[in-house]
Image: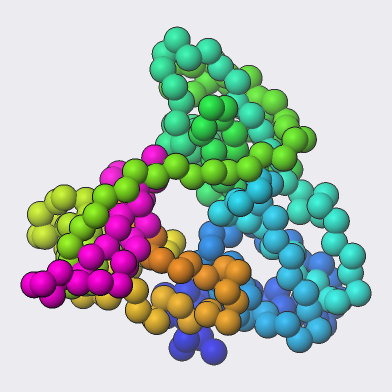
């Protein structure tokens, strides 16, 4: 099985152990927060035989979610996910806090990324975390950048709604170095160096091959689980943001592919 998960072998072994514990010891297994790529791996490895999988991220449309793996006879409740949704309250005299500000402050406390779910900065600022982590955060997180903050646990349903800025591009190839260079308007050489340095992800997975082809089946080995499959590639470029790459399925007279980039605001 491991040969089908190149680069994810350690994570797959962990999930295989979860499957063993749930099946052979009839236990309910709660994971850390997993990104969509990791969630897909869980669904592929666990399958549906004699086990059920439930997911929740604290927000409606959450990207990072905790999964519960358990035998069929378990009744799973929302509180079993042990997720806390927190609002960050502050005065904006020093400017608006953003996703990266909150994540940086949490990481500086020594908190692992897997303990933090989505961070949503719209009109209000929220983040999700594990119950166990929240008590530590509440005790130690008093300021982000120059702003004094107050943390408030939220019980209302918060729906994440992404906003995009769209641009049309023409691609001669779906090679990753070409895609990154074109979408982010950086030299091809810089794009290649950034990919090799591990600064680029495709659909939440590190890709270090400059010749990797976007929109190919290699990233969709979990296609039977359509609820978690990305219909379009999401490219993440460290310190440059994220963009959803949509192939418009038409070409110019010169044979270039017409694509739309949906840049996350």
Figure label count: 0
At 14% from the left and 51% from the top, the residue drawn is: 186
Tell me if residue 115 can be seen: no
Chief SS of the magenta region? strand
Quadrant in which the C terminus appears: top left
What residue appears at the point 42 percent right and 13 percent down from the top-left corner?
Answer: 94
Magenta region: which residues?
A: 238-265
Coloration mode: rainbow
Kindly identify the residue that appears in the image at 32 percent across and 48 percent down. Answer: 166
- 259 w.r.t. 62: above or below: below
Residue 7: x and y in percent read: 42, 75
Q: Is residue 19 left or right of residue 221?
A: right
On screen, residue 239 versus residue 211, left or right, reads right
In the image, residue 147 above or below residue 210:
above
Q: Is residue 264 magenta?
A: yes
Residue that sits furthest to the top in the current view: 93
Residue 73 position by quadrant: bottom right
Question: Residue 222: horizontal and vertical position, in percent?
Answer: 53, 79
Q: Quadrant of the N terminus?
A: bottom right
Closer-to-camera residue (99/20) = 99
Q: Nearer the viewer, residue 243 or 257?
A: 257
Quarter-wise, where is residue 71 in the image?
A: bottom right
Q: Residue at x 66, y 33 (%)?
A: 86
Answer whether residue 148 is visible to the viewer in this image: yes
Q: Quadrant of residue 68?
A: bottom right
Q: Horizontal and vertical percent for residue 96?
A: 44, 22
Residue 52 x %, y %: 78, 74
- Whether the magenta-drawn stretch holds residue 261 is answered as yes
């Amino acid at each position: 099985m491991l040969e089908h998960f190149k680069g994810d072998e350690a994570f797959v072994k962990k999930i295989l152990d979860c499957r063993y514990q749930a099946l052979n010891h009839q236990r309910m297994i709660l994971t850390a927060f997993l990104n969509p790529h990791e969630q897909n791996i869980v669904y592929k490895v666990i399958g549906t035989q004699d086990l059920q999988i439930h997911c929740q991220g604290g927000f409606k449309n959450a990207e990072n979610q905790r999964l519960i793996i358990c035998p069929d006879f378990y009744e799973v409740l929302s509180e079993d996910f042990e997720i806390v949704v927190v609002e960050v309250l502050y005065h904006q005299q020093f400017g608006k806090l953003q996703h990266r500000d909150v994540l940086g402050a949490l990481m500086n406390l020594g908190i692992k990324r897997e303990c933090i779910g989505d961070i949503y900065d719209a009109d209000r600022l929220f983040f999700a975390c594990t119950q166990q982590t929240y008590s530590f955060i509440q005790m130690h997180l008093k300021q982000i950048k120059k702003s004094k903050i107050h943390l408030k646990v939220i019980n209302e349903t918060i729906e994440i709604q992404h906003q995009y800025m769209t641009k049309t591009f023409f691609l001669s190839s779906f090679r990753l170095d070409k895609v990154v260079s074109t979408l982010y308007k950086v030299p091809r050489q810089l794009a290649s160096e950034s990919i090799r340095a591990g600064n680029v992800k495709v659909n939440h997975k590190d890709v270090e091959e400059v010749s990797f082809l976007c929109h190919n089946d290699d990233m969709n080995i979990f296609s039977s689980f359509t609820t978690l499959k990305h219909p379009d590639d999401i490219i993440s470029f460290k310190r440059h943001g994220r963009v959803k790459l949509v192939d418009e399925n038409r070409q110019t007279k010169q044979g270039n592919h017409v694509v739309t980039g949906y840049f996350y605001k």
